[in-house]
Amino acid sequence: MAEQDVVVELFYDGGWHDHADRVYTRDPIEITRGRGDEQAELVPSTLSLTFDNRDDRYNPRNPSSDLFGKIGRNTPIWVSVAGGGSGRFVGEVSSWKPRRALKGDAWTEVTASGVTRRLGQGTSPLLSPAYAEVDRQTGVGVVAWWPGEDGAGATELAAGLTTHGPMRIVGGSPQLGSSDAFPGTAPCIDMGAAPTAVFHGRCPTSPDTGTIKWRMFISFPAAGLGSAQRLVDLYTAPGTGSVRVWRLLYDNPFDGTFQLQGLDSTFAVVEDSGAILPIAAGLDGSTWMLGFEVTEDGVDVDWQLAAHRLNPDGTQTGVAATGTFTAQTVGIPDEVYVGPDAGLVDTALAAFVVGSSSATVDGLERAFTGWVGETAAARAERLCEEQDVTFDLQGTAGDTMPMGPQPIATFTEQLAECERADGGILYETRGGLGLTYVTRTALYNQTPVLELDFAAGQIAPPLDPDIDDAHVRNDVTVKRVNGSSARAVQETGVLNVNDPATDPDGVGRYVTQYDVNTAFDAALPDIAGWRLHLGVTPDIRYAAVTVDLGAAPDLTADVDAINIGDVLTIANLEADLVRLLVLGYTETIHTHTRTITFNCVPASPYSVAQLDDPVLGRLNTEGSELTTGIDDNDTSLSVATTRGPLWTTDAGEMPFVIRIGGDVMTVTAISGAASPQTFTVTRSATAKAHLAGAAVNIANPIVLAL
């Protein structure tokens, strides 16, 4: 093979700089991407190479180096092979190891990783979905906010911004950090028995925008509250508006109404929206986002009352009532009193937000439900956006599994939960610092990207088949987080749970459980069935397939093109074409050699039903067998149907492929209006003899997708 034209670039001084001429050719460049097998989850990509460091240039601590202050921990690095399309690796240098021999030689061993390594280094969980969403919007007119997610031993409510102080707790015995009323928050405030606490907070000085916006989250007891309970009194700074207090009231007629009032400097009520019934059932016994917005409109003030019930399925129900208070001005927010009547008995509270813009904290409701119903791909994309990580989606987000409430966990744990729920593949993007998700449905019925021919010597040794039980799972339970469970068991057929001493298809029981955070229990039986389907795949496993591009240079373009989640095939290895799903690979680049070893699993489980397809659209027989034995050269078979309908005799449905004991045959004609029927077949080069009673099946029976 000709000498490799390798490009190795480091990013500094605002651009990429090539250092390939300083890479030591005595050591290979080695790249690993993806996972080793289907049991693993997201793992960082890695790169290892060696720089010639005889002048100590590649020592980040050497002040005499022209690279001093430019290279160090997490310096971006790019590796590509000329003519090979996109880069083979993009990552961050996590380790520089200057080494020196006793005489003369010196080198620096470089280890780089994909972005997941850095993101996974910390063990602190992400903010709650609710906290993260409000925090994301703080640049849009949020004046002050208090999350209400304080621990049980807290004596005040922490501020959500650094520009203002905490909320004081006056009286009462609130149980902080004890309510789970809001799936999208950390445990929040349980107000307990009367008299309840009053929370008092001060807003920082802010400009007069002519708008004040208030949002709070509250869960009402089924019995409701006492009459005319003040939910909040929001004071304006003296002299800044004609309304000194904006008041949000609860009343108990019709199972809970609310209203907005404006009080003047003498604290007399001068404006009143009147009672608003948000829905026919009222406020009581439900969890709500409540708030108001007042905005100056000429010499008047337009007001809006908002009440959105947070439903368990992630949807919202409610009302937005509007009106106008004439000849008033809004003022600048100054102080907030939550529950000033000490009567918010048995309520749960979270997140008090003061804004100065109509755009402040819009669309918070879904975050406070924990984004229930959000699809797995949409959640992964949102999480990446929140962490400033580039995200690429292969497939359609709407085809992925709806998720349950987002837990409080680390970033990588959250992503793994999305992947487990849907069943796709998450990996680090090859051409950039980011993540790519291939949806489960995008794995179905793929066209191969790399087609190999074993007989043509396109596969380098070793190619070791594994006929083992490493991935057998024939008794599968799927449990929903905080929900129900479903079980699927392979009672009959290949790799079933029966004792192999009494059932030739039995292998004994292999029990496993998968915990998934799906939105609904109804999805569990189908997920369990799919997991069982994956766990009883009878195909021979080829865990590692190596291609030496020095021996097969014509494969270079296809080898460079194939990626994690793609399919490769091997012809002339078994009677059937071998289809493998790529989960990862190791690439080794030396001066005149370049090899890639793909980590693979059988792709056959992802060949699913496809209407009107001549291969994937055929139902299998319920039960068929040979009436008489056949030799390895017989082309006429007598087949009896033992259960279910007869085989088709329609010439338009021919040809199709059947399988008898691992022997594949192409059926060109079937005759007979009753069982047994006569099959005319074309035999393969590896044809075998079979005894009477051998099972006859469609070679690729229809499999229903999840």
Image (spheres, rainbow, N blue to C red):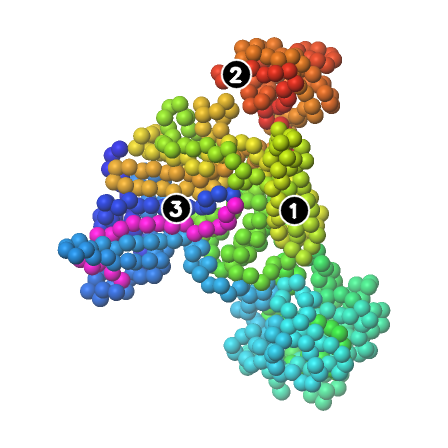
Amino acid type of the residue tagged 2 in the rendering = Ala
Label number found at residue 687: 2
Residue 352, visible in the rendered structure = no
State whether the magenta stretch is mostly helix, strand or loop: loop
Amino acid type of the residue tagged 1 in the rendering = Thr
**Marks 1/2: CA–CA distance:** 39 Å
**Marks 3/2: CA–CA distance:** 40 Å
321 and 526: which is toward the camera? 526
Which quadrant of the figure has residue 669?
top right
Determine crowd level at label 2: few under 14, some 14-19, many 20+ residues with C-alpha closer than 10 A: some
The residue pinned by badge 3 equals 32
Residue drawn where x is 56% and y is 49% of the image:
419
183 and 694: which is toward the camera? 694
Number of numbered markers = 3
Residue 516, visible in the rendered structure = yes
**Marks 1/3: CA–CA distance:** 33 Å
Which quadrant of the figure has residue 156?
bottom right
The residue pinned by badge 1 equals 477
Q: Which residues are magenta?
A: 39-60
**Horizontal and vertical percent for residue 562?**
43, 37
